[in-house]
Each structure stands twice: as C-alpha cells, then as structure tokens.
Image (cartoon, rainbow, N blue to C red):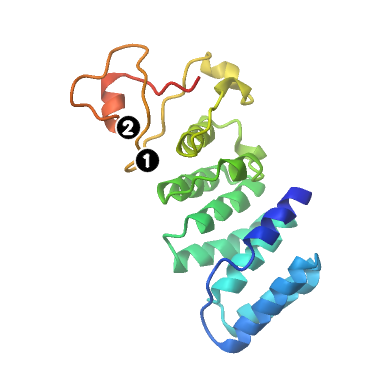
Amino acid sequence: MKRGFVILALSIGIAGCAGGGNADELATRAIAEAKENRLDAALQLFDQALAQDPNNLKALYNGGLAHLYLRRGDAAAQRFGTFVSLRPDDALGHFNLARAYAIERRREDAIASLKRAVELGFDKHEEIVGGGFEAIEDDVRFTQIEVLVAQRAGLAFEVSRRNGAGAYGGEPIRANRLPGQRINVQCKGPKVPPGVSGNLTDIEQTGCEPDLN
C-alpha cells in the first residue's frame, strides 16, 4: 500500500486540465490534500471539481489515482474511462485504467487496456511489477506484455519466475503482436531468412521465438 501512494505522489498533476477555473482550482486544492495523505478530503474536492466540469482532466486523472491507492477499482475505472475517452492516446491513462480493471478482476478489460498502453509506448516495467495486477498475473497474455515492456526497457526477464510458469514448459513465450514493435531475436529453430527484419509478424511466419533467457 505504501508503494501505491508513492506512485500517486509522483504522478499527481501530470495531466492537463480542461474546463473552467473553478473546477481547476478545486482540483489543485485536492492535489495538495492528497500530497498530505488526506485522501478523503482530496476526493471530496475532486468530486466537487467534476461536478463543476465533468471533463476536467486534472480531477479525473488524479482522482482516479487516489481511488487506485484506496483499492476502489470501480470508482477508479469510471474516472480513467472518462479520461481516456477524452485523451485516447494517453498511455498512462490506459495503464491506470488497466490497474483499475485488475482490482475489479475484470480480466479481459484489464488485458485490453494494458495492451493499449503498451501500443502507445508505455515502457515502465517497474510500474507493471508493482501495479497491482495480482489478479491477472497467471494469464499468459499478461506475461507476454510484461516481457515486451521489459525488452523495451532493456531489462532481462526470466519467464520461470512467473506464477504458473510450469504451464509454459520452460520455453520462451511467443511475443504478443503489437503494431510497430521490434525486438532482438535469436532463433532456436529455423534461422531468420535474409531480408527478415525482426518484425513480430515476420518472426511468427518463420517460427522463430524471441530469446527471453
């Protein structure tokens, strides 16, 4: 729980604002309360800001973070759902929406939102590890996404440490296909033919796997 609040404190205020000055002033006051660990007071102010302006990005994003810290997944999902509808290309918004869905054990929604965050460039592997995804960590798709983010961040990743890894037989997990994603490949079977660049689609066609060891 302590780490969750550190994330809140570091992330607070990164989103821009929309709407009238009254809502923005309320959201700014709410952020100050949250930084002092007075989350109940902060959430009241965030709610007041959203009553003034339902599309205030600062209140939506940071109010969502406060609900995440309190493990209120449904309330967080509502706020981040609205946030990404207004800013559909915001990777952090989709990532935090995935966290909210994971708290609520909405597996398919959590995987879809996390995948979208990675498609948009999310590369903070440490946030995935400590992001509260325990409810979906046994899903091979979650591991695929975690592998991609680790590779993007230049980190080594050992598949065997994941719960349920025995189901994978110790073999590298096939990479999840994400648009534009490129990875370093070492073939354990067929060699990459001349002209194959390492694009995930090409790798799947040749039967090569990314070397995750």
Residue 36 at what x, y percent from top left?
80, 68
Residue 156 at what x, y percent from top left?
53, 28
> Tag 1: residue type?
Leu
For residue 178, the mark is 1
Q: Residues within 10 Å of mark 1 (few under 14, many from 20)?
A: some
Residue 126 at what x, y percent from top left?
61, 42
- Image check: 12 left or right of 16? right
Q: Is residue 22 above or below residue 187?
A: below
Of label 2 and label 1, which has the lower sequence position? 1
Residue 38 at what x, y percent from top left?
81, 68
For residue 128, the mark is none
Closest to the observer: 171 or 111? 171
* Residue at image point 29% right, 12% down: 190
> Tag 2: residue type?
Leu
For residue 200, the mark is 2
| Label 2 – label 1 distance at C-alpha | 8 Å
Q: Is residue 29 above or below residue 93?
A: below
Residue 72 in sight in this render? no
